[in-house]
Image: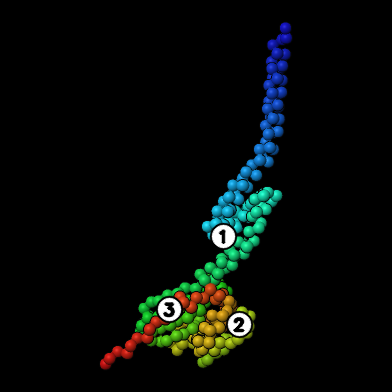
Amino acid sequence: MNPPRLRLAAALGSLLVLAGCSQSGDQAQAPQQQAQAPADDSAQKLDTYRQLVRIGNDEMAVTMGKEIVSRYPNSAAAQEVRQSLPEIEKRYTENSEKARLANLWLYQVSPMEGGTQSTATIYSSQPSGDDRVRLVLRRHTEWGQNAFLFNGGPHGFVCKGVCSIKATFDGKPGTISAFAPSTGEPALLFKDDKGFIAQLEKARKITMDVTLQDGEKKETLVYEVGGFDPSKWQTVAKQAAKKK
């Protein structure tokens, strides 16, 4: 008979052999399972991609399409996606930019001293943050139409009498004649508001070189005006003269 110690060693050896076989079998099956998973997953993702395209969700369709092409580049799903993805991505990029530009504008109609005013306002893209300067288009029932810059800070602009602002409209140089209001607001009113608005409606980007009263700092203001919608800047009827 084998001594107990030898029998124990033999039993442990058998267990190790079985464990090794089991691990070897698991490892042999794993690559097959991993190889099959992406193919099944890509088919499911392709179905989702088709549905997103069908309902017009370009943002999610682009995200899903890029994932399919990246993770399963050699699959039939990726081949199908490549045929439609470039056009969808281009459309999504263009529409996103249009929405971004449109959202830069704020349109309001509100009571104002002496009547009612309708405004279309956009902040400068540069400078940004707390140093932003507003560009305002205004219609007022008594004061008529104006276009002006308004600095929300405590200081206005350096402008003696009528000053000339160097400007560009989509890179084309020009000038804007302006004046500071006699009432002391930190603003610059444009003399030819109609002419300025006509140029603004055709432009995507306007720059203006101004000098701020705060240390006579020179600043180039940049406005991305391409999202302006004239139909949202409401007209206001002039009030009838009061009978004495």
Amino acid type of the residue tagged 2 in the rendering: Thr
Residue 187 in percent (x, y) is at 48, 83
Residue that badge 2 annotates: 168
Residue that badge 3 annotates: 234
At a point 57% along the width and 68% down the height, the residue shown is: 97
Amino acid type of the residue tagged 3 in the rendering: Gln
Decide which of tag 2 and tag 3 comes sooner along the chain: 2
Q: Nearer the viewer, mark 2 or mark 3?
A: 3
Residue 209 in percent (x, y) is at 59, 82
Q: Nearer the viewer, residue 220 or 167?
A: 167
Decide which of tag 1 and tag 3 comes sooner along the chain: 1
| Tags 2 and 1 touching, CB below 8 Å | no
Residue 155 in sight from this viewpoint: no
Give the secondary structure at mark 3: loop
Kindly report the distance in space between the C-alpha atoms of the residues bearing marks 1 and 3: 32 Å
Kindly report the distance in space between the C-alpha atoms of the residues bearing marks 2 and 1: 35 Å
Lateral position of residue 129 relative to residue 243, left or right: right
Q: Which mark is residue 212?
A: none
At a point 51% along the width and 76% down the height, the residue shown is: 228
Q: Nearer the viewer, residue 69 or 99?
A: 69
Q: Quadrant location of residue 3? A: top right
Residue that badge 1 annotates: 58
Kindly report the distance in space between the C-alpha atoms of the residues bearing marks 2 and 3: 27 Å
User: Which quadrant would the N terminus be assigned to in this image?
Assistant: top right
User: Which quadrant would the C terminus be assigned to in this image?
Assistant: bottom left
Within 10 angstroms of label 1, few (less than 14), some, or many (20 or more) residues?
Answer: many
Decide which of tag 2 and tag 1 comes sooner along the chain: 1
Within 10 angstroms of label 3, few (less than 14), some, or many (20 or more) residues?
Answer: some
At a point 45% along the width and 85% down the height, the residue shown is: 145
Residue 174 in sight from this viewpoint: yes
Residue 52 in percent (x, y) is at 55, 55
